[in-house]
Structures are given as structure tokens and as C-alpha cells.
Amino acid sequence: MTDVERSVRPRDRKAQLAAVAAELFRARGFPGVGIKDIADAAGVTGPALYRHFADKQAILAYVVVSGFEDLEAATAEALTDADSPADQLEALLTRLATQAVERREIAALWRWEGRHLPKEDQREIGRRSALALATWAKALQIRRPELSSEDAELLCWAALSVFGSVSVHHTSVARRRFAALLVELALDVLNATLPSPSSEPSPPVVGLGTPSRREQVLAAATSLFAQRGFHDVSMEDIGAAAGIAGPSVYRHFPSKAALMVAIGHRAADRLALAAERALQTSDERSALRRLAASYVHTILHTPELLVSFSADRVTMPDRDKADLLRVQRDYVAQWVTLLSSARPGLPPREAKITVHAALTIANDLARTRRVANRQHFEAELTALLHTALGVAD
């Protein structure tokens, strides 16, 4: 390599390559991107890419860890630079919102692709996440001293989901307004009043009889896909979990993709049924509150809804994929229509961003063991959705 070549090479080549990879991972999912794809998109050769990263997993680790380091730096700056403790929270939220809007792909990779990282990296990010949440919770308790540390942490998890929601949709508004809207939503959540504990525990869900072999296979696949992701589960794994030989699974489903299609339709049908019951009222505000409650109840009692389709970019027939996407969009549109009716002053795009923030709070917290095991979690999660939507009592 000549001195001229060295002089023109960008000093931040590693970060540039990682940024290209991050966009590809977001668009196609980690399993669907190869080193050659990244090299081609970046306009370099494979060997040139390997000079910076040992493998594809190392690129993902660099992207996720650097994004998390930015979040830690934003936290430290906000809590140090704010004029008073009361201003710390707003300063922190403003920085996090700006990062979320400017780097939407980081939130997507952190939420969906983290399981592809080495176990040691996953543990380290988990440890640092817990420390960051504890720091935010302390800042919130300065503002709201009546909160217990556990309640403050729950609210901070919900606020973090508001920022993470930008990764699940493509709706946008002007950057400054987008960031301001996220701050408003996060502040609403952090100021939410959690419901008083109910004295009557929810009755246990009891099944009747023994499910068919097909249902056992579907249940096993649902659990494994939710835990490990579509690409890391084999038909043999599913058969073993269902108590049958791997090849026997094919008697009920011709492929893993067929299983995912069945799971998707099962989840959609249960949401549609719950929504139909919730919407049996003529008042839009009441209907939206009931719809949010139905979603929370359904997601907490329907394992199929904990399976992520977006994270894995599952390969399935185009017709099935289009059908499931249409059902999902119609369901979200139902929320947006109700919210626009209940809050007529809210612009359409902001209504859609708000709905996605509320749904992401439910989806994220339902998968977060640290908070999902709370005794009155369903009532608390419903209250948080009502607050995010602006229809709390």
C-alpha cells in the first residue's frame, strides 16, 4: 500500500463499515446477511473487511456495544450537566430521544439481534443495562420520591420502550418534532400513576383435556421460537420438545415456515377476537381503553404473541407473508383510528407514532422477566398503555 493510499483512507473506516452492516442487519435480519453482502454494500473486498472485524458476529457486537456506550455517555452527560436534579430527567430524555431518532437502526439491533452476540457480550450488556436503569430510576425518584425503587424501575423500562419503538415502524415527522414527541411520551409514562394492588388475584388459566398432537407440536414450536428465534430452532428440536421424533413433525407441518404461518394466524385471530369484544361500545375513548386492556391481557396469556416475526425475517411464502402483514397493519390502523377520534387534535402521523410506542411498551415489558413477574403486572401494564395513549383516568 502506498503512502497516498494510506492518506486517503478514512480514519473512521471501522465505524463506517459497521454502519453499513447495521443497516443491512436491520433490513434483512442478522441471519440473512453475509460478509460478502456487507463488503459489497460498503464497496470493499472481503479481505479488507476482515482487517477490521474477525467475523459477522464481531461486527454486530461492535454496533450494539458502541450504541450502548453512546447511551451510557448520554446518561452521564445529562446527569452531570443539568442545572438541578429536577432538570436531570428532561435532559436525559432529550438526549435519548435525539439518539433514537438519528440512529433508529441501533434500537432495532439492540432489541432484536442481541441474542446473536456471544454469551459473554450478552451478559455484559445485561449488566450494564441494569446499571443504567438503576441510574435512571434514582433520577426519577428524586423527581417522584413516593416511588419505590421497583416501581421507578418499571416506569424507566417503559420509557426506554418508547425510544425503542422507533425501530418497529417507518413513520416519521420532522426530526426536532419527532424527538420532542418521544420526550413527551416518555415523560407521560414516567409520571404515570400505577394502580393500587387489587385484593383479588387473577384466576388461574386451566386447560381442559389433553391437546392434540398437532397442538402439542405448535405449542412446542411457539415456546422455542420465542426463546431462541426461528433460525436457531430445528425441526428435531421441536419434535424433542413435543415428545416425538423430529421427522414426525412433518406429519403435522411441512416446514418451519409453515409453523410460523400457523403461529402468526393463531396470534392474529386471538387479537381480533379480543378487539371485537373490546370495541362493543359507542364511545371512542372508552373503546380505546378497552382495546388496550384487551391487548395486554391477550399478550400475557397468548404465547404466540411472544414470537417475533420482525426479528428473524422469517422466510415464508410471499402470499402468507403479505397476508400476515396486512392483518398486522389493519390491527394497528384500528388503534390509530380510535386514537385520532379520541384525541382529534393529534396529527395523524403523531397518532401512529404514539400507538406504536404504546404497543412496544406492552411487547417489551411482557418479555422482560425483571418486571413481568410483578404480582399485579397486568393492571400496571394496562395503566401504562392508557397513559401513553393519553386516555388515562
Image (cartoon, rainbow, N blue to C red):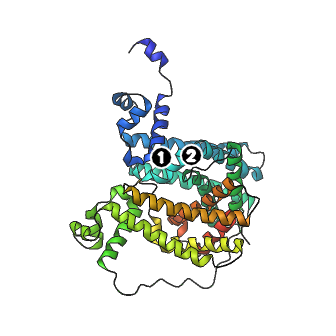
**Quarter of the rendering containing residue 216:** bottom left
The crowding category of the residue bearing disc 1, from other C-alpha atoms within 10 Å (few below 14, some 14 to 19, many at least 20), is many
Residue 258 vs residue 100: left or right?
left
Q: Residue at x 55, y 76 (%)?
A: 274
Image: 177 above or below 294: above
Secondary structure category for the residue under label 1: helix
The crowding category of the residue bearing disc 2, from other C-alpha atoms within 10 Å (few below 14, some 14 to 19, many at least 20), is many
Residue 74 vs residue 105: left or right?
right
Residue 139: image location, x then y, percent: 69, 55
Q: Give the residue number, with chain letter if any, for mark 1.
A: 26
Label 2 or label 1, whichever comes before in sequence order: 1
Quadrant containing the C terminus in the rendered view: bottom right
Q: Amino acid at mark 1?
A: Arg
Tell me how many marks there are.
Answer: 2
User: Could you tell me if residue 57 is visible in this image?
Assistant: yes
- Whether residues under marks 2 and 1 lie with C-beta atoms below 8 angstroms apart, the answer is yes
Q: Nearer the viewer, residue 233 or 248?
A: 248
Q: Amino acid at mark 2?
A: Arg
Q: Residue at x 57, y 71 (%)?
A: 296
Residue 276: image location, x then y, percent: 57, 76
Q: Which mark is residue 104?
A: 2
Image: 119 above or below 188: above
Residue 298: image location, x then y, percent: 52, 73
Q: Residue at x 48, y 69 (%)?
A: 268
Can you name the residue that lies furthest to the top here? 3
User: How many angstroms separate mark 2 from mark 1 (CA)?
Assistant: 9 Å
Q: Nearer the viewer, residue 273 or 42?
A: 273
